[in-house]
């Protein structure tokens, strides 16, 4: 199944579409201290593309270089239209993982990193996306704060060629 990492693949492939002030603000956010309840992603997909149900996920990874130790977990993001948020039932587990990372960081200064990634599995509707289709991504980092544009008009062709896009599965159970 094809997966898109919004904070990785899409940003790299669409670097000309990344909004620098938002990217800088995002780079200053620590995965170990940011309140996961504040995070929300607004995804504007082109006609002919949707997100397969229950495939939008946030993955948090903790890495401790000195011991080559990695710990993490993945959480399904709840969708409300084109906005994705961490399910309130998962907040305690994410906060526990953050606390473990902060403890590692206190015990092993300079050896601990945290990372957040968001992935999803696209599917097609109707005839699929047009060759010149684009995607927009906005992010909210503060509770009740504004959505800030992160990616504007990134071409789908930057992350997959048209043949790959036409081979996406059909949306039988897509999110609204």
Image (cartoon, rainbow, N blue to C red):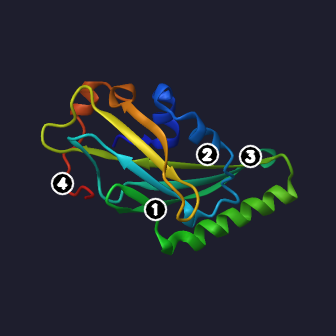
Q: For the point 34% across and 45% down, which residue is it?
A: 44
Label 3 or label 2, whichever comes before in sequence order: 2
> Which residue: 35% across, 38% down?
135
Q: Position of residue 6 (x, y in %)?
A: 47, 42
Image height of 132 relative to 66, above or below: above
- Which residue, given by chain and number where applicable, does mark 2 sit on? 26
Residue annotated with mark 3: 68
* Residue on which disc 4 sits: 172
Q: Secondary structure at mark 2?
A: helix
Disc 3, SS:
loop
Report how far apart the C-alphas of labels 2 and 4 lie in the structure: 34 Å
Residue 22 lies, in percent from the top left, at 57, 42
The residue located at (39%, 31%) in the rendering is: 154
Quarter of the image where the N terminus is located: top left
- Front residue of this view, candidates 11 and 65: 11
Q: Is residue 87 left or right of residue 105?
A: left
Q: CA distance from mark 1 to mark 3?
A: 31 Å
- In the visual, does 115 lie left or right of 79? right
Earlier in the chain: of badge 1 and badge 4, it is 1
Instruction: Tell me, yes or no, whether the two marked residues, 3 and 4, touch with CB atoms within 8 Å.
Output: no
Q: Count how many numbered circles sit on residues in the image.
A: 4
C-alpha separation, residue under disc 1 versus residue under disc 4: 22 Å
Comparing 4 with 73, the one in front is 4
Name the residue at the front extreme.
146
Q: Which mark is residue 85?
A: 1
First in sequence: mark 1 vs mark 3: 3
């Amino acid at each position: 199944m094809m997966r898109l990492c919004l904070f990785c693949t899409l940003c790299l492939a669409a670097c000309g579409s990344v909004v620098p002030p938002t990217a800088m603000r995002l780079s200053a956010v620590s995965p170990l201290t940011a309140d996961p309840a504040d995070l929300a992603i607004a995804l504007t997909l082109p006609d002919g593309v949707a997100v397969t149900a229950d495939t939008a996920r946030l993955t948090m990874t903790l890495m401790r270089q000195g011991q080559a130790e990695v710990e993490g977990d993945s959480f399904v993001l709840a969708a409300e239209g084109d906005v994705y948020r961490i399910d309130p039932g998962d907040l305690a587990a994410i906060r526990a993982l953050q606390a473990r990372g902060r403890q590692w960081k206190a015990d092993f200064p300079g050896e601990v990193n945290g990372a957040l990634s968001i992935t999803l599995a696209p599917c097609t509707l109707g005839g699929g996306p047009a060759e010149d289709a684009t995607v927009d991504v906005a992010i909210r980092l503060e509770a009740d704060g504004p959505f800030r544009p992160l990616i504007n008009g990134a071409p789908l062709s930057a992350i997959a060629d048209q043949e790959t896009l036409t081979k996406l599965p059909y949306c039988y159970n897509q999110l609204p």
